[in-house]
Image (spheres, grey):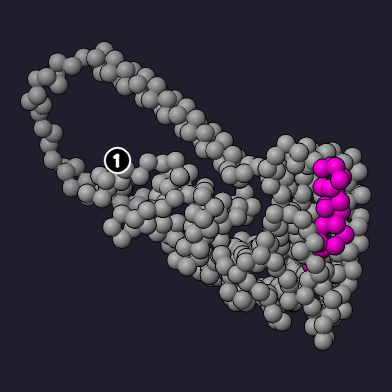
Amino acid sequence: MEPRTGLCVVLLVAAVVGATTVAATPVSGQTGVIAQQSAVDADDVRITVTLAEDGTAEWRLAFRSVLANDDEQAAFDSLQADIADDPAAYTDPFAERIRRTVATAENTTDREMAADSFSVDTETQSLGREYGIVTYRFTWENFATTSGDTLRAGDAIDGFFLDDQTRLRMQWPDGYTVDTVSPAADETPDNAVVWDGESTDFVTGEPRVVVAASGSGLTPAMLIGIIIVILLAGVGGWFYQRRPSDTDDDPPTAAVDTDVGTETDADIETDVDTETDANIHTDASSTESDTDTAASTAAAADDEPDPELLSNEEQVLRLLDDHGGRMKQKQVVEELDWTDAKTSKVVSGLREDGTIDSFRIGRENVLTYPDESLTGDDDDEADE
């Protein structure tokens, strides 16, 4: 099979069977396991569910394949062109399967639901390695339930199946805080939880996420009180500045500094002009510097890959790059907020693949790339 044909078949399978990883069937009255996610011939899958305040969820399913050689790159380039020319050929079978899934969830939860706004797009990204990514998106109405300021999500995908190459991320709007999460998440970034199929298996009653809106805590009466306090403080300050000075009745003191007396009006005016010009020049330089810094920061931020698209191994490699190719293993634990066991497992896999090396300095485990020297700086650090 030619590379182009093979990759197209894989993505069609993903769209009709595998990509519908949300396709569930009732089992013993419950929403069952998800259908054949293993049918997707991708290196890994990233599923992101973004909850809205009204219970609607925006779904994104990103299928990532490593483009390890020219043939795979050429095949993905051809697929990109095909999807751009006729996206409906990919979204229509995907939408049909998703709508059947949503209908099943509607019957199971006894909640009216709908799926719409289907789309597909492709891109390539360099995340340590070159990836070809095909992303499907759709909107699931009434995916979560709302009760006052509380969102409850997960019953529509009860028993969701995650294989070892799949991660599920569920995130919620700003202003909400977590009440309960089941099972415990593998990662907890801001306003989100992440489950990794390598370490998580959902059972009946999972996954579940409950979040509640967190108010500012300021009632109208409190706001009025704050305004009154601010006004009173302002009036008091004005009266304090206007009060007579204790030295108003004292006679003026004659000047005894002859240097001050000999300073002319022209000298004063010259000093003022010089200081003003210097201040203007300094302010302009400061403003220009601040603008350049902001532009550089924004450009750097645009080059950063999406963190949720990084695998565990890629997160470690990216962190190692940020530290100049050498860092302590405990820094990985602290900066990625991982457990020691998870960190050790990921590092061991990278070491077995020959991607990184490690050595000990005292009680510390140090990570480095294989081509990094293990002498010199290491001896100095050991002596310390």
In depth, the one of 126 and 135 nearer the eye is 126
- Tell me the chief SS of the magenta region: helix
Question: Dot 1: few (<14), some (14–19), or many (≥20) neighbours within 10 Å?
Answer: few
Q: Position of residue 348 (x, y in %)?
A: 49, 59
**Range of magenta residues:** 1-22
Residue picked out by circle 1: 376
Please name the amino acid that badge 1 sits on: Gly
What residue is at 62 percent from the left and 66 percent from the top? 198
What residue is at 71 percent from the left and 60 percent from the top? 47
Q: Position of residue 383 (x, y in %)?
A: 22, 49
User: Does residue 378 appear left or right of residue 194 in this picture?
Assistant: left
Q: Position of residue 133 (x, y in %)?
A: 73, 48
What residue is at 41 percent from the left and 57 percent from the top? 329
User: Does residue 98 appear left or right of residue 359 in this picture?
Assistant: right
Q: In the picture, which quadrant includes the N terminus?
A: top right
Q: Is residue 6 visible?
A: yes
